[in-house]
Amino acid sequence: MTTKVFILGFGNIGIELAKRLRVFGVKIIVQNGINEDLVDEKGGLEDINKFASKADIVVCCLSLNNETVGIVNRSFISSMKKGGLLVNIARGGILEYESVFEHLKCGHLGGLGIDVAWREPFNPDDPILSLKNVIITPHVAGVTEYSFRSMSKVVGDVAIQLHEGTTLTGIEFVN
């Protein structure tokens, strides 16, 4: 049986994730996908619950904004396959904490992997940490030599653009 992964947010990070998953024969489902060769199924924001129901693993790679706050809510998680895995490498506010916790406790969610916290600083006594099917890292899972080189290039390019008074590229203004 082929594993199906729904990548919620198919920007740079989502695309890189799909490239890495593709070599394992994973079926890729995305919302708003543009790289046709990486994607098996795509749709719009209105399709996210349908896609969640098809996926064995949901990976959140979305930017946090007014439209995405709490997008992974009770309805979304309830639509996921029983035993499905939820991974959030985006921002903590994407997940509706109470719904995630409830679905982990009752066994609907098979596991949670997060590299971000819904509240900063993260409470080390948070009851979700007592669950055996939860893995959390302190927003360092993507720290690699490649990511440092990429970030350094963006910082250098922006510094030059600021100095020259040209339009800033390569960065996203949030809020």
Image (cartoon, helix red, strand yellow):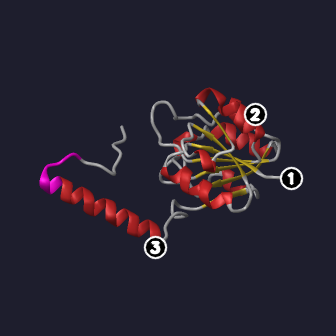
Reply yes or no: does residue 171 show up in magenta. Answer: no
Mark 2 highlights which residue? Answer: 78
Q: Position of residue 51 (x, y in %)?
A: 71, 36
Q: How much space separates mark 3 and mark 2, taking CA atoms?
A: 38 Å
Q: Position of residue 23 (x, y in %)?
A: 68, 62
> N-terminal of the two: label 3 or label 2?
2
Q: How many marks?
A: 3
Rendering quarter of residue 158: bottom left
Q: How much space separates mark 3 and mark 1, taking CA atoms?
A: 34 Å
Residue 171 at least partly seen: yes
> N-terminal of the two: label 1 or label 2?
1
Q: Residues within 10 Å of mark 3 (few under 14, many from 20)?
A: few
Helix, strand or loop at label 1? It is loop
Could you tell me the amino acid type at mark 2?
Ser
Could you tell me the amino acid type at mark 1?
Met
Rendering quarter of residue 80: top right
**Is residue 67 shown left or right of residue 106?**
left
Helix, strand or loop at label 3? It is helix
Q: Residues within 10 Å of mark 1 (few under 14, many from 20)?
A: few
Residue drawn at x 21%, y 59% as measured from the top left: 159
For residue 128, above or below residue 70: below
Residue 1 is tagged as 1
Q: Residues within 10 Å of mark 2 (few under 14, many from 20)?
A: some
> N-terminal of the two: label 3 or label 1?
1
For residue 2, above or below residue 108: below
Rendering quarter of residue 40: top right
Residue 99 is tagged as none
Mark 3 highlights which residue? Answer: 145
What range is drawn magenta here? Answer: 162-167
